[in-house]
Image (tube, helix red, strand yellow):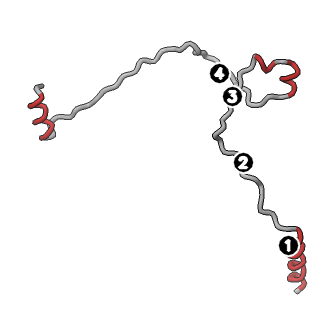
Amino acid sequence: LPERDRAELKRRKLLLEVTLKSYWIRKGSAFSTAVARQETELTPEMIATGSWRQRPFKPYNFSALGLPPACGHLHPLLKVRSQLRQIFLEMG
């Protein structure tokens, strides 16, 4: 269609433009049907035998968040005080 006619049809909402995308998928050089499990830890046995040289290792993620530290414990004297208070409350 000429540009003028196309613009007129779009203005009257009688024309809908659709963009189609297509992709070609091919096997790459590292294609394999077997899934190789990557190692996550280096053990002393691997170092002693030298088997770590042939094994694939998972890349280390430096931006990952670690576990939150376990904190927030009561002071030992406060813990004893609360236990004594509980005992006296139970006694009446």
- Seen in the image, is 74 located left or right of residue 65? right
Q: Nearer the viewer, mark 2 or mark 4?
A: 2
Q: Earlier in the sequence, mark 1 or mark 4?
A: 4
Q: Is residue 14 above or below residue 22?
A: below
The residue tagged with tag 3: helix, strand or loop?
A: loop
Q: Earlier in the sequence, mark 3 or mark 4?
A: 4
Residue 4 % position (x, y): 9, 31
Residue 87 % position (x, y): 90, 79
Residue at x 10% of width, y 36% of height: 8
Instruction: Look at mark 1 in the image and give the residue it sits on.
Output: 78
Q: Within 10 angstroms of label 3, few (less than 14), some, or many (20 or more) residues?
A: few
Task: Say which amino acid is labelled 2.
Answer: Leu
Instruction: Look at mark 4 in the image and give the residue it sits on.
Output: 35
**In which quadrant of the rendered image does the C terminus lie?**
bottom right
Q: Is residue 70 above or below residue 24?
A: below
Task: Say which amino acid is labelled 3.
Answer: Lys
The residue tagged with tag 4: helix, strand or loop?
A: loop
Q: Earlier in the sequence, mark 3 or mark 2?
A: 3
Instruction: Look at mark 2 in the image and give the residue it sits on.
Output: 67
Q: Are marks 1 and 2 in contact (CB under 8 Å)?
A: no
- Asked which quadrant contains residue 83, the reply is bottom right
The residue tagged with tag 1: helix, strand or loop?
A: helix
Cα gap from disc 1 to disc 4, whole angstroms: 55 Å
Q: Earlier in the sequence, mark 2 or mark 4?
A: 4
Task: Say which amino acid is labelled 4.
Answer: Val
Cα gap from disc 3 to disc 1, whole angstroms: 46 Å
Q: Within 10 angstroms of label 2, few (less than 14), some, or many (20 or more) residues?
A: few
Cα gap from disc 3 to disc 4, whole angstroms: 13 Å
Residue 27 % position (x, y): 52, 14
